[in-house]
Amino acid sequence: MTEFTVERARAGDERALFDLIATALHRPAPHDDLWERCDPSVYSLDRKFAAYTPDGEPLGFTGSFRSDLAVPGGALVPAAAVDGVAVRADSTRRGILTGLMDRQLRDCADRGEVAAMLHASEATIYGRFGYGVAVKAAEVVVDSRRARLRPGVPLSGSVRMVDPERDPGLLPRAYRRVGPHRPGMMTRPDAWWQRGRHLVLGRGGHHAAVHFDDAGEPDGFVVYKPAASDHHGHVNSLWVRELHGADLGVRLNLWRFLLSIDLIEDIHAGGRPVDEPLDLVLTDPRAFRITDVEDSLWLRLVDVPAALAARTYGAAEPVLVGVTDRQLPANSGCYRVGPDGVERVSADPELEVDVETLAMLYLGHWRASLLGQTGRLGANPDVLARADVLFTTAEPPWNGTGF
């Protein structure tokens, strides 16, 4: 058994730790030029933990940054965005990952954060730490040769191509205007834009267009890359990296812009909302296809009482929800959840759920009745029907931010 301790990442280990995570994820390590050019805050060790051997060699690493998560009803709750988890290939399955995740969760709780969230590289890892699939996302393809907007589609403002490198504050400004307007969306702190620019702009060859409202203020943007999709190497496809708008009219206008680009046969976009309504506005709805749906945001409720109290609920009789959380036992207990609020009570629960499944329910993607029918939680049909009304949201959650 490998001997190790989990502690806050040590000063001076920045490059070794970020090289470790790059190697574990089979990505190129940051090169010398990048280290010399980047702001030191980009690779800050704040909120980072590492597993060390007795002689100080790092074996594993995890980190996060602070964000705010939108929950049903529109409130924002403080959340940890876990942007890196890795264990060295020769040290896996020795308890290192468990030690790192437990330490990180305790740190989130100490900071007063209500939730933690991540995008999982593998779907079998994080459930045992209380994370559940709370948001799903779609991959879509549009045949731009056939796709035409119906007459009368509501459009507003104007779209203009921009160079984000010349005006680096423009896309952050537009995203702030968009705001986390649906459950599952999150704020993007300055550190995200500094270190995560490649998540928006890629590593070259991407173009950006910004939507401006009638007053000339940015309220949406799209980032895309032309690519070849045939064996001749002809550039005839667009790959959309990000598309955000303050309302549906803005988003449709950005799609209109993409459809107007010449010499393009198809448009691909990943990480889109599962209810992307493009087929409803096309003269040929079959020009739009959802080609895949997969897990997007995994959620972990760190402070269950605060999380339950932060969101709103549908109009149904309250349900007594019994929660079990073996890693953060202060969360375990019975909660009376209803449209008038949430309170912790001493009573026998009507619906019993572990913290992973509660996270799946929390943002509204999953119906309690389906989770009950598949053995994820225990309750009778009447209770499940009430829980459906309480927890389900008018629109499915969406995240839309890589990290």
Image: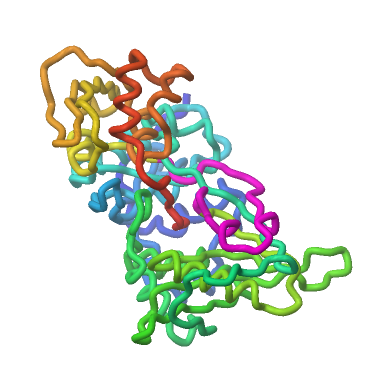
Q: Is residue 129 magenta?
A: no
| In the depicted structure, whether residue 347 falls above or below residue 98 | above
The image position of residue 237, as x and y in percent, is 72, 68
State the residue at coordinates (24%, 22%).
321
State the residue at coordinates (43%, 30%).
127
Picture quadrant where residue 396 is located: top left
Residue 177 visible (yes or no): yes
User: Would residue 150 be found to the left or right of residue 322 on screen?
Assistant: right
Q: Which residues are magenta?
A: 273-298
Residue closest to the eye, 290 or 209: 290
- The number of numbered badges drawn on the structure is 0
> In the image as oriented, which residue stretches furthest toward the right?
232
User: Would residue 34 be found to the left or right of residue 236 on screen?
Assistant: left
Residue closest to the eye, 366 or 307: 366
Q: Is residue 282 magenta?
A: yes
The image position of residue 151, as x and y in percent, is 58, 71
Q: Quadrant of the C terminus?
A: bottom left
User: Would residue 149 be found to the left or right of residue 302 on screen?
Assistant: right
Residue closest to the eye, 174 or 91: 174
The image position of residue 345, as x and y in percent, is 11, 22
The image position of residue 380, as x and y in percent, is 34, 13
State the residue at coordinates (18%, 34%).
305
Residue 5 visible (yes or no): no
User: Would residue 337 be found to the left or right of residue 395 on screen?
Assistant: left
| In the depicted structure, whether residue 46 falls above or below residue 370 | below
User: How is the rendered protein coloured?
Assistant: rainbow
> In the image as oriented, which residue stretches furthest toward the front?
152
| In the depicted structure, whether residue 196 falls above or below residue 305 | below
Residue closest to the eye, 314 or 3: 314
| In the depicted structure, whether residue 381 falls above or below residue 87 | above
